[in-house]
Image: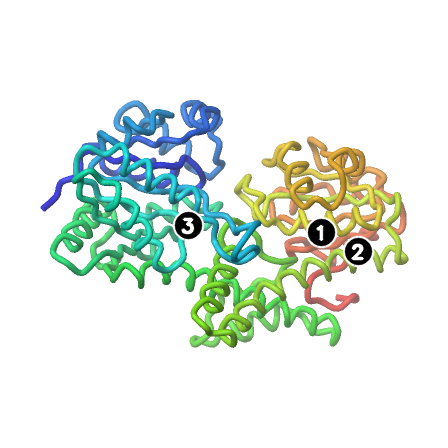
Amino acid sequence: MIKIKNICCIGAGYVGGPTMAVIAQKCPEIRVTVVDINPDRIAAWQTDELPVYEPGLLEVVKEARGRNLFFSTDIEKGIREAEMIFISVNTPTKTYGTGKGRAADLKYVELSARQIAQTATSDKIVVEKSTLPVRTAQSIKAILDESSNGVKFRVLSNPEFLAEGTAVSDLLHPDRVLIGGDQTPEGLEAIEALTDIYAHWVPRERIIQTRLWSSELSKLVANAFLAQRISSINSISALCEATDADVDEVAHAIGTDSRIGPKFLKSSVGFGGSCFQKDILNLVYLCEHFGLPEVAAYWDQVVIMNDYQKRRFAQKIITSLFNTVTDKKIAMLGWAFKKDTNDTRESAAIYVTDHLLNDLALVHVYDPRVPAGSMYNDLNFLSSRSPEENERMLTVHNNPYDACKDAHAIAVVTEWDEFKTLDWKRIFSSMKKPAFLFDGRNILDHAALRKIGFKVYAIGKGEKM
C-alpha cells in the first residue's frame, strides 16, 4: 500500500486552503504544502488575517502552520517533493468562445496539469479537487501521459462538498467523502492511499469509492439538486405573496413529509456563491453537448427562477417607493452571498444593487466582512456602467446605522446574525418617512418592525402579515 508522506495542493483559495489545513491538523505525520501563484494570498495565509474567512479556520491553521502545514509560491518545488498533488484551482464559467456562459473554463486546470507533467521526476497521484465537468480526468490524464518523460500518474476525483460559513465543520464531520478512480489495480491502490488519509478522522463507512466519472458527475448533481429545492420554494414564494399565504408555513408543512424533508426550503432573495449557478450551467452545457436538450432545459429553469427572484425583489423596492428610486438612498444590509463568509461570488446583493443603480438609486452598503474594494469589483465586472459611476452611486459604510441614516428604504440581503439585534427604533427614527424595509432573508421580527412604524415587505408573505 502507498503511504503518503508529502502532499502538495495547487491553489490556496476557498477550497484548497481550508481542506489542506484540516488534513495537516489531522495527519501530523504528513507534510502539507499549499502553493499558489498569488504572493499576496500566500503571505496572508501566514498571518492571522487569512484570505478566507471561515469560523474556526484560523485556529486549525495556527495549530498546523509551521509544524506540517506550509504555504509557498514555489510551485515546482511543491510538485517535485509530493507523492500526492491536489488540483484546487478556480474553474469559473466561460466568458468567451465555445460554451460561453455555461461551460466551465478549464484553462487553470490544464495549466496545472502541464506544470505537474513538466516538473515531476517521480510517480504521482493527482487528485481533482476543483469542481469539474464529467470526463475532465480524461483530459488531465492525456496531458500528463503525453508529457510525462516516463513518470507514471494516477488521477483521482475527490470533489468537495463544503458549505461556505460551515466549511471547517463540514471538513471535520463530513456526511461523506467521495473518491473516484480507475477500477484497475493501480487506480484502486491510489484510491486506498487517499482513503487512508481521510480515515485518520472520517469513519470508513462514510468514505465512498466510485468510478472516476461517477465521482465527477456526483458533485454537479448534488449542487443542482440543492439549488433546485431553493428555486422551487422561491417560485412558491411569489404565489404566496399573490394569495396572502405564508411561504414559511408552506415550507414547514411540506418539510414535515419524510419524503421531502426540511432542508433547503428557506425562501429568500436567491442563492449565490461559487458553486450552485456555475455547476448547474455546467450541467446544462453537458446535457446540450450530449444531445439531451429536454434535460438541459429542465436544469436551466433552476437558474432562470433564481435570476427572476433577485429581479423581482429589486423591482418590489422600486414599485413600493412610488415607482421611482432616482436619487433616493437605499440602504443595503449585507453583500456576502451568505452569512459567516466574505465570499461575494454570485451574491444576490450584486444583482439587486445593479438593478437599483440602473434606476439611478443611491445605494449605501454595510457588510461586516466584505471590504469596499470587493463590492466595487463585483459591480465593475457586470460592465453595466463605468467604474467612476459605480463609485459615485455606491457608498460603503463601516457600521449599519450610518448606512441607514436618511435612507428611504432598507434591503436585508445577507442573513448576518447581527442584523437581528440592531436598534431598529434608532434606525427608524433616522430614516425618511414612510420608512420601508425589505427583508430578503426573512430573518427579522416583522410584527415588531411594523409596530415601530416600518412598512415591511418579506419574501413569500402577504403585505399585512
Residue tagged by mark 2?
Answer: 317
Badge 2 vs badge 1, beta-carbon distance below 8 Å: yes
Q: How is the image coloured?
A: rainbow
Across and down, in percent, residue 409 comes to: 81, 48
Q: Is tag 1's residue or tag 3's residue first in the polypeptide sequence?
A: 3
Q: Quadrant of residue 417?
A: top right
Asked whether the beta carbons under mark 2 and mark 3 sit within 8 Å of each other, the answer is no
Answer with left or right where residue 278 lies relative to residue 25.
Answer: right
Mark 1 and mark 3 residues within 8 Å of each other at the beta carbon = no
Question: Between 149 and 370, which is closer to the camera in this rendering?
Answer: 149
Q: Mark 3 — residue?
A: 162
* Residue denoted by label 1: 352
Please tell me how crowded label 2 is: few (under 14), some (14-19), or many (20+) other residues with Cα within 10 Å: many
- State the SS at label 2: helix
**Residue 221: percent from the left, percent from the top?**
42, 64
Say which mark, if any, is on residue 273: none
Q: Residues within 10 Å of mark 1 (few under 14, many from 20)?
A: many
Residue at screen point 65% across, 47% down: 420
As shown in the figure, which amino acid type bears the numbered disc 1?
A: Val
Q: Residue at position x 25%, y 62% from top?
A: 211
Locate the C terminus by quadrant: bottom right
Give the camera-side residue of 242 and 212: 212
Q: Gap between marks 2 and 3, in whole Å?
A: 33 Å
Circle 3: element type: loop
Which amino acid type is shown beneath numbered disc 2? Ile
Q: Secondary structure at mark 1?
A: helix
Above/below status of 231 relative to 146: below
Residue 143 in sight here: yes
Q: Is residue 200 visible?
A: no
> Residue 63 appears at what percent x and percent y?
32, 29
